[in-house]
Image (spheres, rainbow, N blue to C red):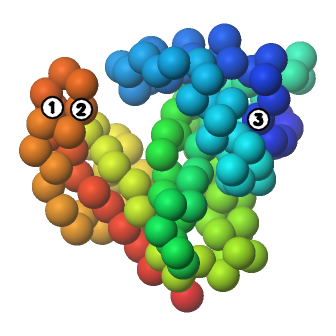
Amino acid sequence: MTLREFRANDLPFVGAIVAEALHEHYDPSLYSSLSTEWPTGFLVAADASDVPVGFLLGVNQVEGEARVLMFAVDRNQRTQGIGTLLMTTFLERCRERHFRRVTLEVRVSNATAIRFYTRYQFSVVDLLRSYYSDGENGYQMARDLR
């Protein structure tokens, strides 16, 4: 497993992971656009053939704060430490940029993800009603970086 920055030829793989894991569909230009804003904040975990099997897309929209905009691992690659590698590396990069806080959103029904984020000291700070495109509520979670 290698960890690297997002590349344009990752689009079909990242899009497929988003559709399957996050149940969302975004215009492919979104990924390319966001990758130019903070290239080292868009992490891709790739297998031995350099095929993306997971990713974490971080953005910096508020001064001093990072946001995990999207984070997913291919269903067949879960429980192998890929999510841990992505999150740990992302938090290190946030500290390097002297961010004070990291936020993210998660579906209220996604107990596995909520447990994962809790292990990284994220806690629920808000309920986001009808946040997702299918109408499901979300939680905003946050953690301080100290």
Q: Which SS class for mark 2?
A: loop
- Amino acid bearing label 1: Glu
Q: Are marks 1 and 3 in contact (CB under 8 Å)?
A: no
Residue sitting at x 87%, y 22%: 50
Mark 1–mark 3 Cα distance, whole angstroms, equals 29 Å
In the image, residue 51 sits, relative to residue 141, either above or below, namely above
- Amino acid bearing label 3: Phe
Q: Which residue is mark 2?
A: 132
- Of residues 55 and 34, the one drawn nearer to the viewer in this rendering: 34
- Expressed as whole percent of the image width and height from the top left, the position of residue 39 reads 76, 48
- Of residues 81 and 23, the one drawn nearer to the viewer in this rendering: 23
Q: Which SS class for mark 3?
A: loop
Residue sitting at x 57%, y 54%: 59
- Expressed as whole percent of the image width and height from the top left, the position of residue 129 reads 10, 44
- Amino acid bearing label 2: Tyr
Q: Earlier in the sequence, mark 3 or mark 2?
A: 3
Q: Which residue is mark 1?
A: 136
Res. 101 in view = yes
